[in-house]
Image (cartoon, coloured by chain):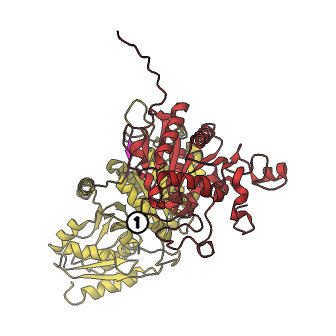
Chain colours: A red, B yellow
Amino acid sequence: MSVTTKEKVLARRPDSLAPAVTHYCPGCGHGVLHRLVAEVIDELGIAERTVGVASVGCSVFAYDYFDLDFVQVPHGRAPAAATGLKRARPDLVVFTYQGDGDMAAIGTAEIIHAAVRGERFTAVMYNNSIYGMTGGQMSPTTLPGMVTDTTPAGRDPAEIGYPFLVAETLAAQPGAVYVARTRLGDMASIVKTRRALLRAFKAQLDGEGFSMVEVLGSCPVNWGMSPSEANAFVAREMVRHFPLGVFRDGPATPPAVAEADGGGGRGTGGNVSAARGTGAQRPAQEGTGRGDA
Amino acid sequence: MAIAATQAEPATEALLYKGNEALGEAAVRAGCRFFFGYPITPQSELPAYMARRLPEVGGVYLQAESEVAAINMVLGASAAGVRVMTSSSGPGFSLKQEGISYLVGCELPAVLVNIMRGGPGLGNILPSQADYFQATKGGGHGDYRLIVLAPAGVQELADLTGLAFDLADVYRNPVIVLGDGLLGQMMEPVRFPALRPAPDPPDWALTGARGRPRRLITSIHLAAEALEAHNQRLQAKFARMAERETRWEAVETEGARLVVVAYGTASRIARAAVELAREEGLPVGLLRPITLWPFPAKPLAELAGGDAARFLAVELSAGQMVEDVRLAVAGRAPVEFYGRMGGAVPTPREILEVIRRQLGGDGR
């Protein structure tokens, strides 16, 4: 007697992802983040008018994994190239995919001024506090005390400063309409990350201004941890320095309007929700005067 | 599409234009609708002109936060398949070199303007030709060549800018328009061609993968075989450029015993000196390279194999183009050099003295 089984598809590869095997190391979060971006692009039905801008670093080969038009650009310059693309063809949906070295070090000027101008593209940042592609050097977001190839005794904030708070910096710019920081590592966090990406791309589609999602993820190989240890480190340690939350969600706001509305100057107006959760544990908030308040 | 239809603008009568502004108008008339730049003297009138003019034709002018950002905005816009330009001067042009190398590696067209000033370092804002090596010998990393156009007046600034956009598209390679502070600032009559519409995006542009496979624009090829093959293809393209695009002007070179070689501003002064010398009966001619790369080596070699007994390179530099003259002449005749630096500009009489010395004794 034959048995007919009705198949139910619970999950499948998003159309916007190419059927490729990635080069990422075991436990790396880039693959998960690629998938989330692809799912969001599928959900919004924008694949046929989306162009990705690949950066330099581990995710340089993102263009091999997305089934989308892509351009690969110099280290740190993805926001400038995205500006050129979007200005040339405003009907395109444009996103950059960058790491912390690319966005927060060599590309600092480009990302900040993209936010300042309110460029209508979406920046996706994978922050794992290290240069992975080059073998594990200190990045601008390396945590205090963290041992890397170039901080063999651990990052000493007295010598080389504290981690760069990218999301907070970008959210302070009136041209930004959506800026959030999320993390990977467990299902609930992954779902939140997907939600943030969806909101960021929608902000672009609405033509409101600059949108960005900073996603905390691991680098087990260069951290010298197992994947599960690395995930636990993200959840326990990284979030102490990089509070999760939505730092801006609302229309771009000229500074004068923010002052009139909120009375507290830019960054504290009605459009900006304070960082949620673990932020209070940051050493940064104890009056170090690093301009991140 | 951002590119709005615009009313037809016909060819113009002669208009009095500043060099930098003529360059801008010529770019617009060639179909350029996008300009990304950063202020620097002595080219600032060009971005200012574009900021006024581009919105009139549905284009976009954007002031970047740096020269580095500007060249990468050019890269992004070019990847989208539009005609795009940036401009700068010495220090700023140095900052663009990484992006230029990427444009070549990605095979993306663009027109890049360097209105040269005195260097090295911050130097000054006076005319100079000391960026010849940077423009013609690479400038950035990797094996590459760019067509370098060297106008010698406002009309030619306009004409060569239009040509630059066409050559950039034909070869999918950036083209440099190399002027200097004097050319950028001077005013001369100029006639512009009719306004051309912005062209449709080419079949390699990133327009979204609608009804076709995805497209990738990149300069990375990890395997040695792949990168060597990519380089071989680029070199074959550069060879085609050298074969087809070499341009120069020969003035009274027939029968000349001394051939002066000069481009751009230096060629205008050299031309006046040659005229003075001819009035004295001296057998002098001028060869003016219009493309600095590809360099007009062949006509120089032919002159060296004929009547020319001596060559004199005149530049606003310590002697850069003269190396290409020596390579072309290949030891068949002496090649002398006369140059001024740091914004100093020689007079025709000054060059005439050098010509007389060169031809002293057996010259006539």
- At horizontal 39% and vertical 83% (from top left) the residue drawn is B349
- At horizontal 51% and vertical 75% (from top left) the residue drawn is B126
Q: Residues within 10 Å of mark 1 (few under 14, many from 20)?
A: many
The image position of residue A163, as x and y in percent, is 61, 64
User: Quick one: B14 or A202, which is closer to the camera?
Assistant: A202
User: Quick one: B75 or B178, which is closer to the camera?
Assistant: B75
List the residue tagged with mark 1. Answer: B152
The image position of residue A122, as x and y in percent, is 57, 45
- Answer left or right for A247 relative to B313: right
| Extreme-front residue of the structure | A1
Q: Main secondary structure of the magenta part?
A: loop
- At horizontal 44% and vertical 20% (from top left) the residue drawn is A7
Q: In the rendered image, which quarter contains the C terminus of chain B?
A: bottom left
Residue A150 visible, this angle? yes
- Answer left or right for B233 relative to A215: left
Query: Does the stretch in magenta take in A28?
Result: no
The vertical placement of B134 against A186, above or below, is below
